[in-house]
Each structure stands twice: as structure tokens, then as C-alpha cells.
Image: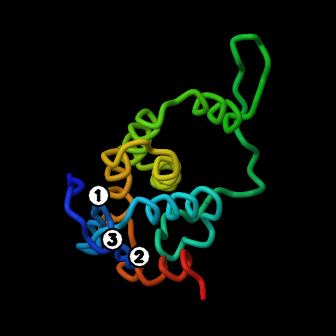
Amino acid sequence: MTSTTTSIATCLLCGAGASPALNLPRFAGSSCRECARRVGHLLVDAPATVMEIWPLLVDDEDELEAEPKVQRSDGSTVELRQLTAELKRDLTIEDRMKLAELYGEIGLIREQLQECGRVLVAAPSPELVQRALNVLFSRELCSPLGLEQLRGHLFPS
């Protein structure tokens, strides 16, 4: 696992000093905390805009297919998506990062990427941010052209 460094480095995204420097494994460079947070917001608020960077964000679910329904302990029935969202609301950021890692282990990559975005937005510590960046900027998940494309989304002209 790549860890954060304590030295100041130049952020590959905005060009500012990054302390602590957060590693972007795919690009052998660093990010500042603010750019990591901006990346998280893109993943959470506008995932369609960054699909060329993280191609596995593409939602291959059939829009016409009905969402599975589950029965609650009180006998009411809700869509699985709604129940899952309710359960996630009570998770800590650490738990959300663990969930992201679990999603990766079971092959739910789109969900993993989305959870990493939520961690970047809200993580209280550089260690949690780094864990999310390690996933997002891995060779397996991030496009090799992702850095230039990401700069364009973060800092449009």
C-alpha cells in the first residue's frame, strides 16, 4: 500500500504545494488534499463526467429492469437500493472505506469507485484519503490518460 509522505511535493493536478503529499500511484506523483476532495466531488456529484478516466463507472444496469424489492422486519417492502442507502447513512468514513475495499474484493467496481469518492469528500485523515486514492489511481482502474482529463474537469478553461 502506498502511504502519504510528510514532505511537501507539487500537486500534479493544481500545481500547488501539497503537504502532506498524497500519492497518486498511477502517475508516480502527488496530490494536495484540496484536489483529492475535488476528485471526490466529481465522483459523487457528476460521475458521468469522469467515465473516461474511470471506465468502470459506466452503469451497465438496464434502466427498464425493475429494482429488486426486499421486505423489512416491520413487514414493509422497499427497493433494495433504498434500504442500502439507509444502511450506509449510519456508516463512519472509516467504515465506508472498508466497504469500498470489500466492493473491490467482490467485483463491484462501480460501487467501489463511488464509495472512494465519498471518502475523499469527507475523510478526516490523510491516511483515509490515501487509501481511497490508492484504489482510484491504481493501474487497474484509472485510465493512463486520466491525469490530463482530470485536470480539464477540475480546472476548466
Mark 1 Cα within 10 Å, few/some/many (few <14, many 20+)? some
The quarter of the picture where residue 16 lies is bottom left
Q: Residue at x 30, y 61 (%)?
A: 19
Amino acid tagged 1: Pro
Judge left or right: residue 6 versus residue 75.
left
Q: Which residue position holds label 1?
A: 20
Task: Judge depth for marks 2 and 1 and give the one in front.
Answer: 1
The quarter of the picture where residue 144 lies is bottom left
- Up-down relation of residue 41 to residue 66 (above or below): below
Q: Which residue position holds label 3?
A: 17
Could you say which disc has been placed on residue 13 in the image?
2
**Residue 26 at x, y = what percent?**
29, 71
Which quadrant of the figure contains the C terminus?
bottom right
Judge left or right: residue 52 versus residue 48.
left
Count of numbered tags? 3
Amino acid tagged 2: Leu
The quarter of the picture where residue 98 lies is top left
Q: Secondary structure at mark 1?
A: loop
